[in-house]
Amino acid sequence: MKLLSSQNAWTLAAILGLQGLCNGNPAAPQPNSLDSLARRVEVPGLNTPSDEFPASRRESRARREKDVPQLGWGSGVGTPLPIATYEKKGAERLEAYNAARIHKTPDTTIFDDESDASKDEHKSFFNIYENEDYFKFHTETVPTKSYPELQLFKSDDTGVDVGDIKELEGIEITDPDVGLEINVGAYDKEGRIMMAFSAFKENNATPRGPTYVPNNEIGWQAFAHTAGDKVENLKVIFLMNIMNKGFWSIAAKNYNEIGKNYDEMVVWDAGHGEALKRFQRFLGSDNINGKLLALTNHHNAIKNKDIAKVITIPKDVHGSNGKFTAALVLK
């Protein structure tokens, strides 16, 4: 099935995975050139109550879901974790990234033959482009003008003028047997930006062991395959059409703490004290946590840039195209 051939699928890709799955029936946003990923009806295991959890914990989860404002398109997906959990995860991930830079840790390597695998699976990953048993690729040119919401991000904040980037290479990676999406993104051949649409770890059938490649690494390899040694130019990772309720809950908490309305774009610098805590919450989200892990594994390739800021544009911001878009900015 062609990745970019029908007008439904890229919208669904942006909705699904880490960005979420729409469980409601809102009016759909306007389709664009990426709206063509294969349909997916459900993600197994999402929002499924479990008798293994005490009633008090199930009630706590239900309250967290109910209290999340609708900051993106649709009704959202997933059960938010306690805010403190995201904050802790984000602090740990940021500390690990900075430690890798300070200690000049070698980057994770990519190998083409299983015999070259490191005994430590975290020091090397199999080349996904040499693994046709588990990955099928479709690429197509993606005009950035199809995503007007990107024009809201100011070059003073991101370090790059998206208007100067006319097109990206869209890459859909699927399971070759059943066609389910594993990872979908669009990448700048000059390495300046990447757009993350979806990632389905449950569809990644690579067996555990030397040839296993996690989704964060799959996204990185697709980017590196496109940009080559120009990955060092990376400045922004855009998170498209965020549907994850955990991310919404973090944004709501942070917006309320600083007295911002949900119809405002906000730039969250790393900062200190309470500002740092708010920044770390975003880093600990499902949407960013894996991206930061990939950057840690390849910190030398991106010239050890600072994880500088997160920018958030909820759906009620004028010009948002009815979606929640965010950016992780490197400096």
Image (tube, rainbow, N blue to C red):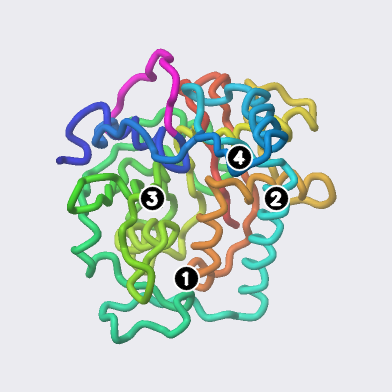
* Residue type marked 1: Ala
Q: Is residue 149 magenta?
A: no
Residue at 70% over, 22% down: 261
Mark 4 highlights which residue? 311
Q: Is residue 23 magenta?
A: yes
Please identify the dominant SS of the magenta region: loop
Crowd tier of the residue under label 1, counting other residues whose Cα lies within 10 Å: few below 14, some 14–19, many 20 or above: many
Q: Which residues are magenta?
A: 21-33
Q: Which mark is residue 280?
A: 2
Mark 3 highlights which residue? 202
* Residue type marked 2: Gln
Q: Are marks 1 and 2 in contact (CB under 8 Å)?
A: no
Mark 1 highlights which residue? 301
Q: Are marks 4 and 3 in contact (CB under 8 Å)?
A: no
Please tell me which of labels 4 and 3 falls first in the chain: 3
Q: Is residue 36 left or right of residue 183?
A: left
Please tell me which of labels 3 and 2 falls first in the chain: 3
Q: Say which quarter of the image contains residue 31.
A: top left
Residue at 26% over, 36% down: 37
